[in-house]
Image (cartoon, rainbow, N blue to C red):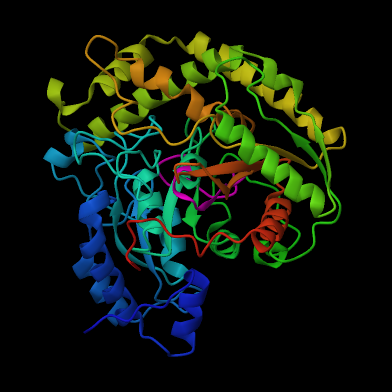
Amino acid sequence: MSGVWIEGDATDQAAAVRARQVKPEELVEAAIDRIERVNPQVNAVALPLFESARQRARGPLPEGPFRGVPLLLKDLICHTAGDPFHCGSLYLKRRNYRASHDTFLAQRFRAAGFVVVGKTNVPEFGPIPSTEPVAYGPTRNPWNLAHSPGGSSGGSAAAVATRMVTVAHGNDGGGSIRIPASATGLFGLKPSRGRVSLGPEWGDLWDGAVAEHVLTLSVRDSAAILDCIAGPMPGDPVIAPAPSGRFADAVGRPPGQLRIGVLDHVPSGWTTVHPECKEAVRGAASLLASLGHHVEPAYPRALEESELQQHFGRIVMASLAAEIAHWIEVVGEPPHEDDFEIHTRYLLSAGREISAVQWVESHVWLQGFTRRMASWWESGFDILLSPTMAEPPPLIGEICATPDDPMRGFQRSIPLVAFTAPFNVTGQPAASLPLHWSSSGLPIGVQLVAAYGREDLIFSLASQLEQASPWMTRKPPVCADG
């Protein structure tokens, strides 16, 4: 069957299926064609699942709101029964590991009507904010192929930015949805802790820092999809506060006059901020003021606490060591030394050296940090505006470990995560909006952060900004539409 592509976002495509303007199998075939044409340039899709997608599209699909819309899954955390699941790692790839079951989130995606057409590229096990695994090679930024699309959801971001698909799954433990969204000109929201389940494998990851959602072309897609996937699996340790209504209803709803704090530097002193990123924040602040919001320089003083890096780093290293050990146990075969990359071997070694007492000490410190951060929103502020990253998208190869310096990738990552990681720790919803492009044509996102449980406020404000400064018609030089 020949493919038929519907221009626009996932909402447009779903509407066309409901109106019988296009069949699910035609839409899926078109997505496959676009992936085959464009993926060789950007290397976003690591694991095509074309034949199973064709079969699902032809068969009876659930009557969900996104029935027949093609979806790419990030090859990390969310897996599907019988399909390859490699986490960007040679260890799992060499053993052709396949998942035995759908995760709870995968079931939610299927119930919404999505058809999974493949898995996207990720850095090995996801801790680096650039997508350059040895197992599958680097994913490239479609705005400039010499640059990274960020990570760890870099494959998903590149796929959506090039319009291979209109939506792709992502997850975010330190910025891994927001950073790629910023680097590729997309909208990316990290939901509140406990909004989307990590079950059944995990109750939480990285002490609650990891959140699941999607990268999209539009705000309305992000909100409507969160309505589909939000909600706990029985036994989840944290359940986000129930929203007052559908997230989709917040899109287009006037947010009222908000009090917005503006932050254009890194208060902890971890890194400096590139002038182009400062300019992006100034432009967004001016736009917000023109829309009637009260905008002022202000931020939570807890962001000045430089100890955050040490404590969160300890949690991440120990958690990743345990996560990798889990997959080794599941596979049932010890790894060879060259099965893991330099940074992964370092994480395994360093993570195993962290004691239970040290882990609890950091856990308690981060809980205190979360309370200190929350007090700023309680004091009367509605939103914090900041850059998403402290610099434009880096070049491919900049954020990599070396045999002499296994921590090089992590240290070089600091400018990318300085504004995003604190809100993984606090569990607050935060989103990157593509409101600025650099003088060289690279996207530069700005971040909106709301109080815990207030995704609705971000969707309302983001949709107001999207209407005032539309971005969806901007397309990169490498694009399936071109």
Give the number of marks. 0
Q: Position of residue 341 (x, y in %)?
A: 22, 25
Observer able to see residue 427: no
Q: Where is residue 457 in the image (x, y as percent from the top left)?
A: 74, 52
Question: If the image is split into quadrants, where does the C terminus sit?
Answer: bottom left
Which region is colored magenta? 183-202
Q: Is residue 402 left or right of residue 479?
A: left
Q: In which quarter of the image is residue 224?
A: bottom right
Q: Where is residue 117 in the image (x, y as percent from the top left)?
A: 29, 64
Relative depth, front residue between 468 and 351: 468
In the figure, 20 relative to 357: above or below? below
Tell me the residue at 50%/53% (across/down). Answer: 186
Q: In this view, does 334 lie to the left or right of 377?
A: left
In the figure, 401 relative to 87: above or below? above
197 within the magenta span: yes
In the figure, 48 relative to 404: above or below? below
Question: If the image is split into quadrants, where does the N terminus sit?
Answer: bottom left
Q: Position of residue 142 (x, y in %)?
A: 35, 50
346 within the magenta span: no
Question: Which secondary structure dominates the residues rendered in magenta?
Answer: loop
